Image: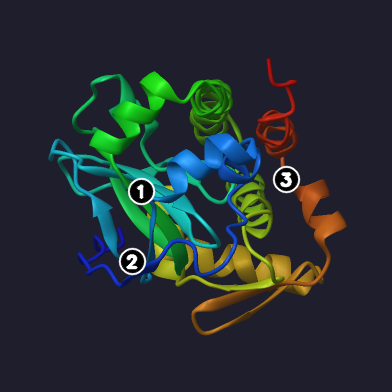
Amino acid sequence: MAKRAPTGGWSPSSATDRPTPNRLLTSLTPAAYARLAKHLIRVTLQPRQVVYKPQQPIDHVLFPDNCVLCLITLMENGDSIEAGTVGREGASWISASVGAPSMPCETVVAIEGTALRLGVDDLDREMKENRHFRDVLTGYSHALLIASMRTSACNGLHELPQRCARWILTTLDRIDVERFSVTQDFLAQLLGTSRPTVSLMLATLERAGLVTTTRGAVTVVDRVKLKDVSCECYAIIKQNYDAIGRAPVK
């Protein structure tokens, strides 16, 4: 099984130096976002950086711009598997807003990039005082629950190529290019399998003309055919995430 990722440091910058593609934040009304923006700090996240460790206090949440975060369940024997993944459609740990001071999973940066960092004290205040922000996060929490339930079912019921195709497709929805960096070791960690098995699976997808692989990177060649390989979980997860923020503001 792949080794756990090392902990990395933050690289902060101003949150207002450029717009964010984070869909939770862009779905806010101008007034709701203006309240929030002064508390946001943009940070740069590195590959395999550990954002949260299991059962350790959480003092911030992250709203990804173009990075991808993976929640990984770790077993006592060292085995691991993806419990959920977060990108520009959401936030890292919104349960912190309802008094959950830690999480049971390890959260690791799967795809490097930037995110907006919000302290939990500011999160608590905005959840109480910023109604539209609270409504958007409530909608997201529902979509995240559905995604987590589908991921659990997918991990137990669907074949490895289907699960890998789902993960690749959801990753593409969270970034701006068809190519992303991910090692086979890390992909094995997420899928709960071994590196040799992942290597054989990617080789099969490559021979079918769906992807190309280089050392530490995957490029999607045919997204339509990759959807055919994936299970129904991808479409269900995407549909619920796409609905966030569409409800009319009251």
**Quadrant location, the C terminus:** top right
Residue 244 locus on image (x, y percent) = 66, 30
Whole-percent x and y of residue 208? 80, 68
What's the residue type where badge 2 is placed? Arg
Is the residue 58 above or below the residue 11 in the image? Answer: above
Q: In this view, does 248 lie to the left or right of 43?
A: right
Give amino acid for label 3. Ser
The answer to the question of whether label 3 and label 2 lie on touching residues, with beta carbons closer than 8 A, is: no
Question: What kind of element bears circle 1?
Answer: loop
Residue highlighted by disc 2: 48
Which comes before the other along the chain, label 2 or label 1? 1
Q: Distance between the residues labelled 3 and 2?
A: 25 Å
Foreground label between 1 and 3: 1
Between marks 3 and 2 in the image, the one whose residue lies nearer the viewer: 2
Between 157 and 221, the one nearer to me in the picture: 221
Of 131 and 219, the residue lying toward us: 131
How far apart are the two marked residues, 2 and 1, measured between alpha carbons?
26 Å
In the image, residue 5 sits, relative to residue 87, either above or below, namely below
**Closer to the camera, 35 or 66?**
35
Q: How crowded is mark 2: few (under 14 residues within 10 Å), some or many (20 or more)?
A: many
Q: Is residue 210 left or right of residue 146?
A: right
Q: Name the residue under label 3.
A: 230
Q: Name the residue under label 1.
A: 39
- Among the 4 quarters of the image, the one containing residue 11: bottom left
Relative vertical location of residue 109 with respect to residue 230 in this rendering, above or below: below
Please tell me which residue lies in front, 229 or 197: 229
Disc with the residue nearer the chain's start (1 vs 3): 1
Q: Position of residue 66 (x, y in %)?
A: 55, 62
